[in-house]
């Protein structure tokens, strides 16, 4: 399948938003369109709590977690640390897909590759925080023979992952906004947070006793490659609702790049764990991918 010269090849795009905004739905829709356009597509499931993404991709079971591949959580005697306590890059985090055994990734019938950072619920009570999963989301990069995949990182709901620096290795942050004030505010706050990173505001390091670790944390934020924050409206019922959301976001300095309509059938899809099929939403996702490609074309090289 052709890939050379495709505008989004090699890019890492994070999908964030409040709980229930539709991050996973948006991730799957974008992945399907990208794959249709000839891209190699990897989804990294970095949501430490939510399950079911693999079913939406028409897979029978999820892949084994990358937490296990990299040696387990530090809280259980493993090797993967929380980036807040230990910002040191994850060793050997650039992985060639053909070096992984098939238990650590899954390829769906359309050719979309799914990897899973890990689920905190699998680790039992007292397992510790999910910071090590954030480190995998920040540092893990997949290489493929003859192709540079687009990587979509599906994050946990809220700001916690972003505040831990998991977004610093992304090219773009995409905020999914459903029709709630909380979602609007999250988009505005995310835009501000990324602006501060781009302006060189350092992370909190007073808790780090080792000066070398403190400097490592500052270096990671200084070298952050995020080009912009983009907003996608989701679960939009009608033109009136879309206009209202756009008005509120514009007041916060944000111009959404696209809109995905409300589709009641998705409730059943996620309830039953069925493959996600939504032809009308697919058309809207096509428009959004086109805008992402244009943004990549216009973005300065980093």
Image (tube, grey):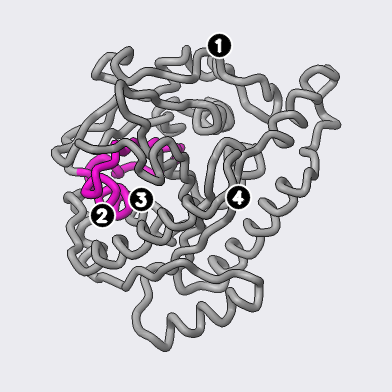
Alpha carbon separation for disc pair 2 and 3 = 14 Å
Q: Which range is magenta? A: 28-57
Left of 142 or right of it: where is 164?
right
Disc 2, disc 3: CB below 8 Å? Answer: no
Check residue 34 for magenta coloring. Answer: yes
Label 4 sits on a secondary structure element that is loop
Instruction: Please name the residue that numbered disc 3 is placed on.
Output: 27
Disc 1, disc 2: CB below 8 Å? Answer: no
Alpha carbon separation for disc pair 3 and 1 = 33 Å
Label 2 sits on a secondary structure element that is helix
Residue 87: x %, y % from top left: 68, 24
Instruction: Please name the residue that numbered disc 1 is placed on.
Output: 77
**Residue placed furthest toward the front:** 5
**Residue placed furthest toward the left:** 109
- Relative to 122, say whether 7 is above or below: below
**Residue placed furthest toward the bottom:** 240
Q: Quadrant of residue 232?
A: bottom left
Residue neighbourhood size for the residue with mark 1, other residues' Cα within 10 Å, grouped as few (<14), some (14–19), many (≥20): few
Report the residue at 66% width, 51% height from top: 194
Q: Quadrant of residue 86?
A: top right
Report the residue at 32% width, 15% height from top: 100
Instruction: Please name the residue that numbered disc 2 is placed on.
Output: 270
Question: Of tags 2 and 4, which is closer to the observer?
Answer: 4
Report the residue at 34% width, 80% height from top: 237
């Amino acid at each position: 399948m052709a890939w050379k010269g495709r505008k989004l090849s090699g890019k890492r795009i994070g999908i964030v938003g409040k709980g229930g905004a539709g991050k996973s739905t948006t991730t799957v829709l974008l992945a399907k369109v990208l794959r249709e356009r000839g891209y190699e597509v990897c989804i990294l499931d970095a949501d430490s709590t939510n399950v079911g993404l693999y079913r939406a991709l028409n897979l029978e079971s999820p892949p084994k977690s990358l937490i296990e591949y990299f040696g387990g959580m530090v809280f259980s005697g493993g090797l993967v640390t929380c980036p807040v306590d230990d910002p040191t890059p994850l060793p050997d985090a650039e992985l060639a897909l053909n070096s992984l055994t098939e238990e650590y990734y899954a390829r769906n019938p359309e050719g979309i590759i799914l990897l899973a950072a890990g689920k905190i619920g699998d680790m039992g009570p007292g397992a510790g925080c999910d910071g090590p999963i954030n480190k995998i989301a920040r540092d893990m990069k997949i290489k493929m023979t003859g192709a540079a995949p687009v990587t979509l990182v599906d994050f946990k709901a809220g700001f916690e992952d972003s505040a831990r620096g998991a977004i610093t290795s992304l090219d773009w942050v995409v905020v999914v906004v459903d029709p709630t004030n909380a979602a609007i505010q999250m988009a505005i706050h995310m835009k501000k947070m990324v602006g501060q990173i781009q302006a060189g505001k350092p992370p909190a390091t007073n808790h780090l006793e080792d000066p070398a670790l403190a400097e490592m944390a500052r270096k990671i934020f200084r070298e952050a490659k995020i080009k912009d924050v983009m907003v996608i409206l989701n679960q939009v019922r009608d033109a009136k609702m879309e206009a209202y959301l756009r008005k509120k976001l514009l007041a916060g300095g944000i111009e959404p790049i696209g809109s995905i309509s409300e589709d009641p059938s998705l409730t059943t899809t996620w309830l039953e764990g069925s493959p996600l099929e939504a032809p009308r939403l697919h058309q809207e996702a096509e428009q959004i991918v086109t805008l992402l490609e244009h943004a990549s074309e216009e973005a300065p090289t980093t």
